[in-house]
Image (cartoon, rainbow, N blue to C red):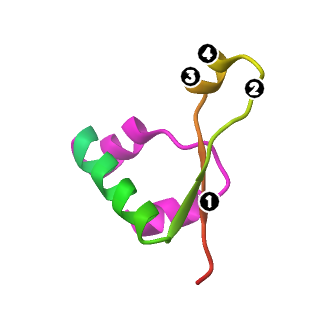
Amino acid sequence: MYKLLAFQTGQLFNSSELANTLNLSLTAVNKYINILKKTFHFYELKPFYNNLRKELTKMPKFYLQDL
C-alpha cells in the first residue's frame, strides 16, 4: 500500500480505487491512510474552493513527506 501511494504522490486520491486494487475493504484502507497521516509519512492536501459543497466532494491529493 505504501508503494502504491508513493507512486501516486501528487495525483488525485480515490480510496475506493485503492481498495479494489489491493482487495481490501474501504474501511481498512481508510484506517491505513489515517495511520500513515498520523505518523507523518503522507500529507493530505484537500482542494480549496469558494463553494464549500464543491470542496467537500472533490478528491484530495496525497504527498509523500521527507523525514
- Secondary element at image label 1: loop
Task: Name the residue rendered at 45%, 69% in the picture.
Answer: 3
Task: Name the residue rendered at 78%, 21% in the picture.
Answer: 50
Which of the two residues, 15 or 51, is positioned nearer the viewer here?
Answer: 51
Residues at marks 4 and 2, CA–CA distance in whole angstroms? 9 Å
In this rendering, position of residue 35 left or right of residue 56: left
In the figure, 17 relative to 37: above or below?
A: above
Q: Earlier in the sequence, mark 2 or mark 1?
A: 1
Q: Earlier in the sequence, mark 3 or mark 2?
A: 2
Q: Is residue 47 magenta?
A: no
Residue 49's disc number: 2
Given contact means CB atoms under 8 Å apart, are the residues at marks 3 and 1 in contact? Answer: no
- Spot occupied by residue 2 in the image (x, y as percentages of width and height): 42, 67
Amino acid found under the numbered disc labelled 2: Tyr
Task: Name the residue rendered at 53%, 64% in the picture.
Answer: 42
In this rendering, position of residue 26 left or right of residue 50: left
In the figure, 28 relative to 3: above or below?
A: above
Which of the two residues, 51 or 58, is positioned nearer the viewer here?
Answer: 51
Residue 57's disc number: 3
